[in-house]
Image (spheres, coloured by chain):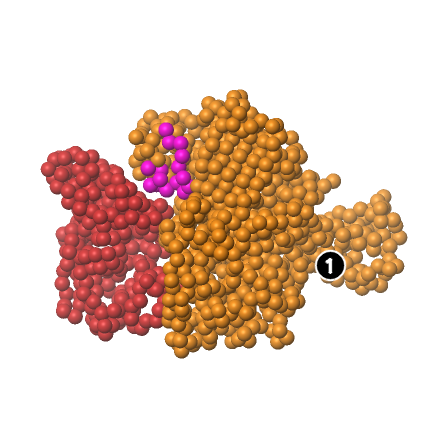
Amino acid sequence: MIPAAFDYDVAESLDHAVELLGTGGGDAKLLAGGHSLIPALKLRIARPSMLVDIGRLSDLAYVKDTGTHIAIGALTRHAAVADDPLVQEHCPIVSFTAGQIGDPQVRHRGTLGGSLSHGDPASDMPAVMLALGAELDVHGSGGTRTIAATEFFTGVFETALTPDEVLVEVRVPKLGASTGWAYLKANRRAQDWATVGVAALVHRDDGKVAGASIGLVNMGGTPLRARATEDALAGGASVADAAALVGQGTDPPADQAGSAEYRAHLAQVLARRALEQAMTT
Amino acid sequence: MSATEERTGYIGAPVKRREDASLLTGRGTYVDNMAPAGTVAMVVVRSPYAHARVKSIDMGAAKQAEGVVAVFSAAELRDDWKAPLPCAWPVTEEMKSPDHYPLTDVACYQGDGVAVVLAESRAHARDAAELIEVDYEPLDAVAGVERALEDGAPLVHPDLGTNECYVWRLDTDATGQAIDDADVVVTRTYYQPRLIPNAIEPRAVLAVPGTTGDMTLYSTTQVPHILRVLAAAGLGLHETKLRVVAPDVGGGFGSKLDVYAEELLALALARRLERPVKWTEERSENYVATIHGRDLVTEYTLAATKDGTITHCRARVKAAMGAYLQLVTPGIPLLGAWIYAGPYAIPNYSVEFTGVFTNTTPTDAYRGAGRPEATYVIERTMDALANELGMDKLELRRKNFIKEFPATIGSGLTIDSGDYLASLDKLLQVFDLDAFRAEQAKRRDNGGTLLGVGFSTYNEMCGLAPSRILGAIRYAAGGWDTATIRCLPTGSIQVITGTSPHGQSHETAWAQIVADQLGCDIDAVEVLHGDTSISSIGMDTYGSRSLPVGGVALYHAAAKVIDKARQIVAHQLEVSADDLEFADGTFTVKGSPDKTATFASVAFGAWAAHDLPDGMEPGLEATAVYDPPNFSWPGGAHAAVVEVDPETGDTRLVRYVAVDDVGTVVNPMIVDGQVHGGITQGISAALYEEGAYDEDGNLLTANLLTYLVPSAAELPSFELERTESPSPTNPLGVKGVGETGTIAAAPAVINAVLDALSHLGVKDVQMPATPERVWRAIEEAKS
């Protein structure tokens, strides 16, 4: 429970954080809520040369209405996202899911940006962002750029962030009245990562499914879109038939929480239930 | 009038725990809080392989690392050990016992220590440990008990020539009828997974050398007295040169009932370096370095007549020892050996236990120790037998309950007291079974989640134990305990107990007992424990023994003190001792209510010694050593309700009702706490916890992420009730309570899962009933 040695510095501004990351030789890590990083440090699974503490950049914690989107600062804690009235009103799948992450301690320390930047395929929020088609603003020595959620998650604990980039803002589209949503996950204990999770958005037209967008948690090395199911629904398939296709293109892990076969089954059941629930919300 | 009938004072009252104020405000003193000047931190280098020979070990870089004081390999310390790590329970004469020293050059499980680093801080020691280069030659390993017994299986200890540690049998053939001749014979095989204890405080050790060759060992131990005897032997010290202290200890559940490598290492190295040496276990390290529990395969048979009278029980148990024999490893499965008939009157009794070495962390005592393992197979098979007979599950139990006490049972022991029918009746008063069955049927009709109820009617033997019986079953120590009551001049009372609490609230409960007996204010009673310099003998705390043995010793010590006080009062008031009555802390002369003496005044008089009977020693103090004439036999009836999602297999406990009979209750709040914790550990064995190894002996569940200890969020509020059959074998009427919940709960939960799925044809789900296992059981039943 004692990390390997590392340097530590406090970022006084976003640019300072970028500068500090640049001095870390590509091996520095940002410290925000620390709820993924610190356990990994203590187990010596993560051995960064340097921690850049961005915990004092309070101007990165906010929720704003941009008109078409809700913009959430990367340092906004999960609990704040869960409780935010703007998020609750315009993109309730995000506030709901934020309230499902870990346990109260995790939600009061962990941040949205940290959860996404960590790139854990078993985390709840990445799949939700994928389903929503969120936009992620990142800032680095090369300036600021916007990355689509579909491009952001590149591998197990890997993202499109370059070593000196910081995720600064996440924008999610406002969901209209015709969009239903559901986030369902199976886990053993309340605080566990999802064995499998399904985020579903259903665009309804006159009581029918006009289209759907589905993100999958822990069904591969990154959060995944269930494209086959989405396409089937767009083509008029029933929810049950479409949900049965959810495993296509996935590569679920096998571990103590379940075999790959069980996860594939679970994903079908949860996809069907999530779609049914999204039809009625 | 017995104490159980008085009930006017502290006994029976929910007196608040006096331990809590310091523990809850962070003012407790745990071993890791202690840091004498000059303390050196110790880190153990552990084998990543389940079985490997150390070909060479390069400690050069570590020795040069910043802050490092010393580094030692197994070979360098070999001469420090005057005896191997002890196993105090050689269960048979032929039992095979491998060499076991604090460090090894042939690792026999993942986590076996091969070297040790000492440095100025833990961080330095931890960093340096990474610099030690060990060249291992991996050897074939075996992790499962059944595989280990197969011909050609890798041998954990090739010099022993077998993985079979022992075979132990107990057979009675009361009726002469063969089991296979019975009308109905039901045999089932059960796997009970390995459980990994997770006391909230991991283990920690601090060895402090003195100036005269003496040593003090502070340890997170349940057994300071036993540890002193055996650690002194291990190091070749006079017992008088070793003081062992168990300060505040954050739970144990049996895992701290041991003599561990790190305790001896810290002592040996403190002696070598002439500096205090401290080792504190990391949480992940706890998963490999502290003993595990359970891990056994049991074939269990019940045979009955057509009308449901059970005639035979038979158990064939294969139990994992792990790689070595720790303090009581081989005896743990046998702690259930006498209760494989449960609370039922079964005349023909046959059990056979095979201890099996595997390349895994050693097993040893874990809450319930042998008895949950027995109750699980009995209660599962009772349900199976009822199904086979076409009989109601509870009716089968009622019919076969032992109904008269004391009862000599098939295994030869005698149950002190009980009323199993009363417990079950009370359970069914709280739990409306008809209403439940109606709701269950409705759920089945409606689709969606299913409900199931499971029952467990159990008994157990605890309160270890009559020393003579322990001797007969080859346990090295006695089962007595000791208590001293010392009256101070003002009437305050010092209690010195041989028990060693680590969460059991002895400071509160012992004060309740003494305050009632002596009729004093509870705050006047101080309870001292856990330090061999204060209580030089004692048998410590495990096996639900503290109250029915140590608590009763306390009663007898108080009786001796009262008796001496009576002699003094009789002398001073010039009356016959027989004419004195003692109640509420005051002696009165029968028929002369104005002639009185308070106990406090007697205490002062005994201390001043101005006017004592001729020849009487001054002072008012007595010690009693109590060796119980029998075990203590709690019992009861539990019901669990689960909700099962038939599509995903997700299984949740939604209701739990327990009726326990633990004899006289000294403090109902503390008993409730024990029952809550015990039930939780049983439930979690049934639904969550599983220590899993792969075939090569790699532990797959080596942290709190993968080893699922449930939280309050996974559990409903338990409904606790009691019936009370005081034990006739002790004057307090008390029985043990520390393990009942764990013993009862697991089969109730699994029986509930099977009840939920019975209409689908599911007959078995292995513990823990993970969603995937439940889903697969449903799928198999469908096909």
Q: Colour of chain A?
A: red
Q: Please state, as top left, top right, bottom left or bottom right, where the N terminus of chain A lies in the image.
A: bottom left
Figure check: B531 above or below B181: below
Q: Is residue B580 visible?
A: yes
Q: Is residue B162 above or below residue B35?
A: above
Answer few, some or many: residues within 10 Å of disc 1's Cα (few below 14, many 20 plus, some between 14 and 19): many
Q: Position of residue A216 (x, y in %)?
A: 22, 47
The answer to whether residue B43 of the structure is visible from this angle is no
Predominant SS along the magenta part:
loop
For chain B, the rendered hue is: orange
Q: Is residue B736 left or right of residue B747?
A: right
In the rendered image, residue B292 lying in the magenta stretch gets the answer no
* Residue depicted at 89% across the width and 53% down the height: B574
Query: Between residues B659 and B462, which one lies in front from this camera angle?
Result: B462
Residue B124 is situated, as x and y percent measured from the top left of the image, at 41, 73
- Residue at figure coordinates x 52%, y 71% from the top left: B269
Residue B22 placement: quadrant: bottom right
Chain bearing tag 1 is B
Which residue is label 1 attached to?
A: B487
Residue A43: x percent and y percent? 36, 62
Dot 1 falls on a residue whose secondary structure is strand
Q: Please indicate whether residue B773 sits to the left or right of residue B423 in the image.
A: left
Which span of residues is magenta-colored? B761-776
